[in-house]
Amino acid sequence: MKILMVEDDPIAAVVLEASLKQLGHEVEVARDGTTGWQRFAAEPRRLVISDWMMPGLDGLELCRRIRAQGGDYTFFILLSNLSNTAENLDQAMEAGADDFLAKPVKPVELKARLRVAERILNYATQVRQLQEIIPICGYCKKMRDDKNYWSQVEEYIGKQAGSSFSHGVCPDCYERVLVPQLRQIGAVPPPYPEVKRVVK
């Protein structure tokens, strides 16, 4: 897995990077929170391990920024020399951290936390894929929502995305439906109108 590691202590960074690589992960190291955020913003990662206490942009603020960005879910592990008090854990979780590891990090604990992270990220991917599959009737083209209610395409998309529609007739339906109707009433069907695209 590609991991973004943010650690300002050079010795702690070397030890943690070696541990992660030994576990088979690809690691990119940022030596401060600002650099970590810039790298994440340029190329989001599914897993971030960050020190809490750093000059400038600390781990909590980095986590808040990642959560505010949205997109695919990122598992965030916060590292700290601070004790695992209820207050510290509350602060970490409120900022959006998924897990909290005390420094120095023990390899066996790191391995266990990374397994949990991988499992959760896999579940998050599966949920996203399920949400992207939209059931549609093969006959009338109505779409089914998550409450098992079938609705027309425009109604479904309007509810899901807040979009509105203007209606028209595609060339196939014009030839198949409207041309015969016009001929039946004695009208001469005009050629299908050419759609002019407006380039902004």
Image (cartoon, helix red, strand yellow):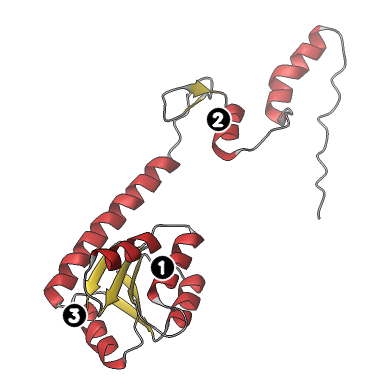
Dot 1 corresponds to which residue?
63
**Residue ID at (34%, 83%):** 7
* Type of amino acid under label 3: Gln
Spatial CA distance of label 1 from label 3 is 25 Å
**Residue ID at (41%, 68%):** 63
Based on the displayed image, in which of its 4 quarters is residue 133 positioned? Answer: top left
**Residue ID at (70%, 18%):** 177
Judging from the image, what secondary structure is the residue with disc 1 in? helix
Dot 2 corresponds to which residue?
156
Position of residue 152 relative to residue 3, above or below, is: above
**Sequence order check, earlier mark of 2 and 3:** 3
**Sequence order check, earlier mark of 1 and 3:** 3
Judging from the image, what secondary structure is the residue with disc 3 in? helix
Asked whether disc 2 touches disc 1, contact meaning CB atoms under 8 Å apart, the reply is no
Position of residue 22 relative to residue 95, above or below, is: below
- Disc sitting over residue 22 in the figure: 3
Judging from the image, what secondary structure is the residue with disc 2 in? helix
